[in-house]
Image (cartoon, helix red, strand yellow):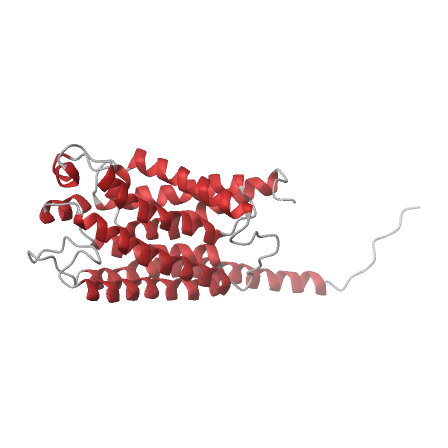
């Protein structure tokens, strides 16, 4: 038996019509916030840290420096710590508001300016007339990398949705596997892409290395934490200058810097490596996590 539909007052429909514009307004506001914070990091925070790095001078008065390859290494360390902490603070605030992934990318966008503000690695070696700047860059990468891993963990914890359920401990088999694979994958990417020491090429190689390292590493070790992959890129930042010292044509690194034969992993500054990690790793890990969930590979 067919029944007539019940009579309604129309109130629910009216409430829904009134609520729809409010929901649209909230979505618009959230979208604006999601994009405005990384943009502010890029256009406001970035120039500030670049100005800080440009305070450093080489012995000849030029700005072709890294943090420890300057007339005052102590000032370089202080500026480097300040740069990483400023970028990290922006990342922590962003993580709290728009999530850890965008928070870390925001921090990386700030730090990218500092990397670009450093001088080309080959120019620094040519000026020194020896491979000694590479030794200083390895030490610099160690300091910056340790600090960068710690800040990255704080950015992750600042996310209101932060959870570590199902994630492997740092010293677990999954973490060690993810670390090793990320180092290998990211190293290959830099070796292929970093054909010279120009600013944008060095930064682009670092970002793509971070993406590849996290993507392949997370597919192989889906329970490893993001901090493991930041550590992998930080480790490459130390290995890179050492390869420049060990893998060089006759005449040493100074000759390689003149002829353009400097080994690819040595062409990035320590700040390039860390900026690439903070920008590229969240992107690569997010894509890998989506694939793992789609295929059920993340289940223990």
| Residue drawn at the location 21% of the way across and 58% of the way down | 68
| Residue 180: quarter of image | top left
Q: Would residue 69 be found to the left or right of residue 162 on screen?
A: left
Q: Would residue 73 be found to the left or right of residue 141 on screen?
A: left
Between 293 and 80, the one lying in front of the other is 80
| Residue drawn at the location 55% of the way across and 49% of the way down | 172
Q: Would residue 291 be found to the left or right of residue 118 on screen?
A: right
Residue 199 higher or lower than 185, as above or below: below
Q: How many marks?
A: 0
The spot of residue 98 in percent (x, y) is 47, 60
State whether residue 84 appears in this view.
Answer: yes
| Residue drawn at the location 89% of the way across and 50% of the way down | 3
Residue at the right extreme of this rendering: 1
Q: Would residue 264 be found to the left or right of residue 16 on screen?
A: left
The spot of residue 64 in percent (x, y) is 14, 52
| Residue 6: quarter of image | bottom right
The spot of residue 130 in percent (x, y) is 13, 45
Quarter holding the C terminus? top right
Between 42 and 185, the one lying in front of the other is 185
Residue 131 higher or lower than 165, as above or below: above
The spot of residue 167 in percent (x, y) is 57, 52
| Residue drawn at the location 69% of the way across and 60% of the way down | 13
Residue 107 higher or lower than 289, as above or below: below
Residue at the left extreme of this rendering: 60
């Amino acid at each position: 038996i067919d029944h007539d539909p019940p009579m309604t007052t129309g109130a629910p429909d009216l409430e829904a019509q009134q609520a729809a514009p409010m929901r649209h307004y909230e979505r618009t506001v959230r979208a604006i916030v999601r994009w405005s914070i990384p943009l502010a990091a890029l256009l406001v925070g970035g120039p500030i840290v670049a100005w800080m790095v440009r305070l450093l001078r080489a012995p000849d008065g030029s700005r072709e420096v890294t943090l420890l390859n300057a007339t005052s290494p102590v000032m370089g360390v202080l500026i480097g710590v300040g740069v990483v902490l400023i970028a990290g603070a922006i990342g922590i605030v962003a993580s709290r508001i728009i999530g850890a992934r965008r928070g870390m990318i925001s921090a990386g966008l700030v730090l990218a300016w500092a990397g670009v503000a450093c001088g080309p690695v080959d120019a620094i070696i040519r000026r020194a007339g020896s491979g000694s700047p590479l030794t200083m860059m390895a030490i610099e990468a160690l300091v910056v990398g340790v600090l960068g891993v710690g800040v990255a963990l704080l950015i992750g914890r600042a996310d209101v949705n932060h959870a570590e359920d199902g994630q492997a401990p740092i010293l677990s088999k999954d973490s060690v596997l993810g670390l090793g694979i990320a180092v290998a994958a990211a190293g290959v990417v830099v070796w292929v892409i970093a054909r010279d020491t120009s600013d944008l090429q060095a930064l682009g190689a670092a970002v793509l290395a971070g993406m590849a390292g996290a993507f392949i590493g997370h597919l192989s070790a889906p329970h490893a934490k993001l901090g493991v992959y930041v550590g992998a890129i930080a480790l490459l930042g130390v290995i890179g200058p050492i390869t420049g010292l060990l893998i060089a044509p006759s005449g040493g690194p100074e000759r390689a810097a003149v002829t353009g034969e400097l080994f690819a992993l040595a062409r990035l500054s320590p700040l390039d490596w860390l900026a690439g990690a903070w920008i590229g790793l969240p992107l690569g890990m997010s894509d890998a996590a989506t694939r793992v969930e789609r295929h059920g590979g993340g289940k223990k």
